[in-house]
Image (cartoon, coloured by chain):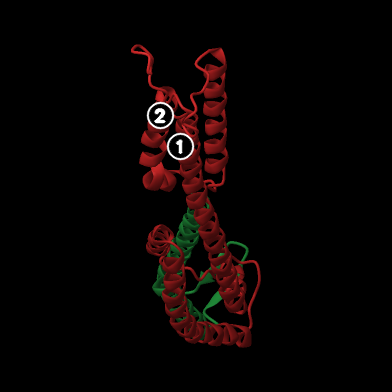
Amino acid sequence: MKLTRDYFTEIEWLTEFLIQRQRRYRVTSQGLVFDRAEDAKAFNEKIDAVARLQEQLNECTRKAEEALRQLSAAR
Amino acid sequence: MDEPHSKPTLPPDSTVVPIRDSSGGAWIRIVLVVLHVAMLAAAIALTPAGYFFELGYYVGTVLLFGTLLVWFLLYSVRTRRGVLVFCALALTQAGLIAFIGMRFRTENRAVQQIMAEAIQQRKEWETQMRPFSMDPLFEMCSGKRQLSSEELQELHTRARAAETKLNDLESAEIHWVAEIGIRVAAVSPGAARDFRVWIAASPSRIRL
C-alpha cells in the first residue's frame, strides 16, 4: 500500500511540475522537450522515480498472484 | 460302568469355528487382503489433492502399522472369529482414514470458497482504483498526446483523490485481512499458516 501511495505522491508532484512549467516545454514525438536543462533534469528524475515505483508495484502484484496461485494449488 | 479308556466328551464350541486350513482358507485370506487394500485405496481417494501430506501426518502410523498388524492377524488366525476380528479392524482402519479424508474435503471446500472471496475482493479493489488511471499523463510524457492545462489539473486532482481513496482502502484491507485470517484459522490451522505466508509475500494487493 505504501508503494501505491508513493506512486500517487510522485504523480501529484509531476503533474504540479508540468502545470507550473506549462509554456516551458513542448510535446514532441520523442517526448517532452524542456527549454531549460534543469527542468529536463528534474522531470527525468521524477519520471524515473514513477517508472521505478510502477515496476515495483507490478512486481508486487505478480508476487501476490503467484502466492495466491500456490496457495490455491497447495490447498 | 465306565470304560477305562474312553475319552471325555467335550461340549461343542459353537462360536469358535475353525476356517478351512486347505487352499480354500488361503484363498479367503488373499481375497480379504485384496478387499482390505481396495477399501484403503477408496478411503485414501476421498482425500483431496494437496492434503496427502497432512493425511500421512495424522493417520500414517495407523495406515502403516495397522495394516501390518491386521495382515499378521489374518495370517495367524485359525478361527472364523479371528477373521471377523480382522474384518472389524480393517473396517475401522478404513473408516478412520475415510473420516479424516472427508474432513479434509470439507476443509478444502471452505478454504477454496474463502480464497475465491479473496480474489473477488482484490478485483473489487482494482475496479475501485481504475478511475485513478494516469495513462493520459504517460501518453503525454512519451509524446503521444498533448494535454491542456485543465486536463493536467484534472490529473493532479485525480492523484490527490487516489491518495484519499487509498487511505479508505487501507483500513478496509486491514479489516479484511484480520477477518479472513480468523475465518481461515477456524477452518484449518494449516490453511491459516499458508494464508499468513501469502499476506507476507504480497505486501500490496491493490493494483493500479
Q: Can residue B50 be seen in this view?
A: no
Task: Give the vertical position of B38 relative to A48 (above or below).
Answer: above
Q: Where is residue A27 in the image (x, y as percent from the top left)?
A: 60, 71
Helix or strand or loop: what does disc 1 sit on?
helix
Q: Which residue lies furthest to the front in this view?
A: B1
Amino acid type shown at disc 1: Val
In the rendered image, which residue does mark 2 sit on?
A: B73
Q: The green chain is which one?
A: A
Q: Which chain is red?
A: B
Q: Residue at x 54, y 43 (%)?
A: B43
Whether label 2 touches label 1, CB < 8 Å: yes
In the rendered image, which residue does mark 1 sit on?
A: B85
Q: Can residue B20 be seen in this view?
A: yes
Query: In this orientation, which residue lies closer to the viewer: A1 or B153?
Result: A1
Amino acid type shown at disc 2: Leu
Query: In this orientation, which residue lies closer to the viewer: B66 or B128?
Result: B66
Image side of residue B155 versus residue A67, left or right: right
Q: Mark 1 lies on which chain?
A: B
Helix or strand or loop: what does disc 2 sit on?
helix
Task: Give the vertical position of B152 relative to B182 (above or below).
Answer: below
Q: Residue at x 61, y 68 (%)?
A: B139
Q: Position of residue B87 (x, y in %)?
A: 50, 36
> Dot 1 surroundings within 10 Å: few (below 14), some, or many (20 or more)?
some
Q: In which quarter of the image is residue A3?
A: bottom left
Query: In this orientation, which residue lies closer to the viewer: B140 or A56?
Result: A56
Q: Where is residue B13 in the image (x, y as percent from the top left)?
A: 46, 31
Q: Residue at x 56, y 72 (%)?
A: B121
Q: Where is residue B35 in the image (x, y as percent from the top left)?
A: 57, 31
Task: Give the vertical position of B170 relative to B92 (above or below).
Answer: below
Quadrant where the image shows the N terminus of chain A:
bottom left
